[in-house]
Amino acid sequence: MEHDGMIQAAGERIRGAANVVVVTGAGVSAESGIDTYRGAGGLWEKHDVNEVATASALRRDPAKVWRFLLLLREHIAAASPNAAHRAIAALEDRVATVRVITQNIDGLHQAAGSRTVLEIHGNVREARDPETGAIHALGELDLERLPPLCPRTGRVLRPNVLYFEEAYDPEIMGLASRWVRQAEVILIVGTSGMVPTPYFLAWEGKSAGAFVIDVNLDRSAPMFTFGTELADLFLQGKAGVVLPQVVALI
Ligand code: OAD
């Protein structure tokens, strides 16, 4: 099938669906000017992941991990939603139930107007008390000294972000899993599959009957797990170009 035919087919599938889940990765925010993690110019080319984004780095040198988080927060603060985020939000006017599951920590889906967003890797604007789980907005904390302290209890806070070597919150993943199993169509957008969760969720949804549409600049082909081959349709291109074309057909 050529490209236009696939856009058409994606539009028809979504038009006929009452429940759509959109699973997104860093590629959905690339056109907002936010660096992806992998690939040329990606964040993990410029920063050593083992120094700034692992549980052991957080134990070893929390201030360094915090400094990287604040750098990301600054980078993200300059960005606004792009045409892909807006197209995903616009689905809500056309489909009864639309749920977004994102690996991104930038909050741009919510800024674009998506109302049901599950952030499985947390949010760059939040800190968390590791013992109680209480969430604090960074804006309310003294960030002069790192790591920041809870203004009420004086306890050391950590970023509310999932790091490598850490397990997902079972409640969050339980909800994600329930959503994909209820979905008739799953759109998976801008993820390399190197962190396998998005394709695992798509696989879980597909096993329960969902039709899977993958949108990416390139086919995802992670070495040890599913990638684009799992999809029923692969729409190659920029999410900010492809998604508005699909949504215009619904
Ligand atoms: P990656 O940076 O691994 O992959 C980005 C994907 O987006 C690639 O497949 C690109 O081809 C695609 N892409 C880039 N620009 C695009 C565009 N304009 N339109 C469509 N696709 C585009 O990001 P993720 O798969 O999301 O985890 O993996 C990121 C996770 O790994 C993060 O959440 C983070 C990271 O290490 C943790 O920190 C735990």
Image (spheres, rainbow, N blue to C red):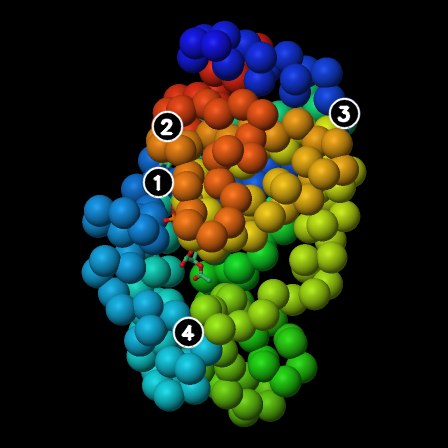
Q: Residue 15, located in which quarter of the rendered image? A: top right
Name the residue located 52 percent from the left edge and 26 percent from the top edge.
87
Left or right, 85 with reference to 177: left
> Which residue carries the number 1 mark?
30
Name the residue located 63 percent from the left edge and 51 percent from the top edge.
118
**Cβ–Cβ below 8 Å for labels 1 and 2?**
yes
- Kind of residue indicated by mark 3: Ala
Name the residue located 55 percent from the left edge and 30 percent from the top edge.
231
Left or right, 91 with reference to 65: right
> CA separation, marks 1 and 4?
23 Å
State the residue in front, 101 or 200. 200
Dot 1 or dot 4: first in sequence order is 1
- For the residue carrying disc 2, how many other residues have a C-alpha within 10 Å: few (<14), some (14-19), or many (20+)? many
> Which residue carries the number 4 mark?
54
> What label sits on residue 18 in the rendered view?
3
- Kind of residue indicated by mark 4: Thr
> CA separation, marks 4 and 2?
30 Å
State the residue in front, 100 or 194. 194
> What label sits on residue 238 in the rendered view?
2
Label 1 sits on a secondary structure element that is helix
- Outermost residue toward the front in this view: 224
